[in-house]
Image (tube, grey):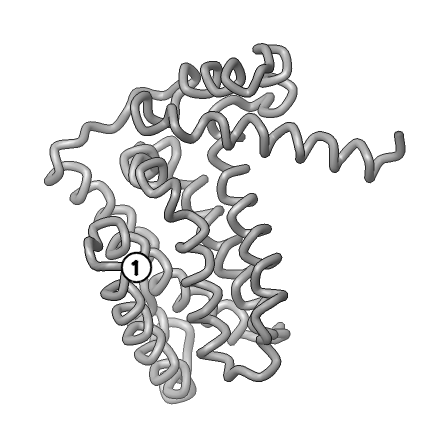
Amino acid sequence: MDETGMHDELEGLRDRVMLATLPNVVFDGWSLQALRDGADMAGLGREEASRAFPGGVPDLVEHFSVWADREMLRLLETRGLDAMKVRERVALAVRVRLELLAPHREAVRRLVPYFALPQNASLGLRLLYRTVDTIWYAAGDAATDFSHYTKRALLSGVYSTSVLYWLDDGTEDFQDTWGFLDRRIADVMRLGRATATFGSLGGLARVLPSPFRFARQIRRRTRDSGVLPMPPA
């Protein structure tokens, strides 16, 4: 088997174990126990689970995000993005990703206390950046100058707050979330057009969404909800 075939086989194994694990996450959190039970439910043993995720739970969490990014891109290829404006492409990408995650919303909810743990915060921020970078890529952004980073910083704020809103949205088909998302993207587009007036990184940084403020928001949300962060797996 060539390298591509081996990679595809491993990705297939990871998908299989991960999808079998997600229902267990609802009860056991993002834990080694959930992963082991998922491997059993997939008809695999601990050896296959270790092969799929040698780094344990962090590898599993990362693959969940990578899988959602990959599936989002696959679905976007069928949505006729060429006929859309940039803001429409970005909004659609965020919506498609959340719709993909809807069957696993409780597993996503359990990521809130997981990423609230100090040792997991950097992983959460890295995955967030990868997702927004993928969304901008799908929207056709090819910028390599300073705007490359400002666009991703702005979208990080939009995406992260939209996820938190979506987790508590009880409306039919998440209609309130899509309205919230559209308003936030409109705000970002207005701010994006105004960035030239700030004249410096320091001036722009004052209005960009801060990942550290987002981390504090997650911790506050966790504390207020009474959900305690899980111990590390």
Identify the residue position indicated by label 1 in the image: 173
Above or below residue 94? Residue 19 is above
Indicate the quadrant where residue 161 lies. bottom left
Tell which residue pokes out farthest to the right in this image: 2
Total marks shown come to: 1
Question: Residue 4: x and y, percent?
Answer: 82, 39
Residue at the (61%, 30%) spot, across then down: 14
Question: Residue 178: x and y, percent?
Answer: 31, 67
79 on left or right of 122: right
Question: Residue 60: x and y, percent?
Answer: 51, 30
The quadrant of the picture occupied by the N terminus is top right
221 on left or right of 3: left
Name the residue nearer the viewer: 193 or 54. 54
Indicate the quadrant where residue 81 lies. bottom right
33 on left or right of 226: right
Residue at the (52%, 13%) spot, across then down: 40
Secondary structure of residue under mark 1: helix
Give the class, few, some or many, for how many residues have Cα within 10 Å of label 1's Cα (few <14, many ≥20): few
Residue type highlighted by circle 1: Asp
Name the residue nearer the viewer: 108 or 188. 108
Residue at the (59%, 51%) spot, across then down: 70
Residue at the (39%, 28%) spot, across then down: 23
Question: Residue 56: x and y, percent?
Answer: 51, 22
Name the residue nearer the viewer: 215 or 98. 98
Name the residue nearer the viewer: 45 or 157. 45
The quadrant of the picture occupied by the C terminus is top left
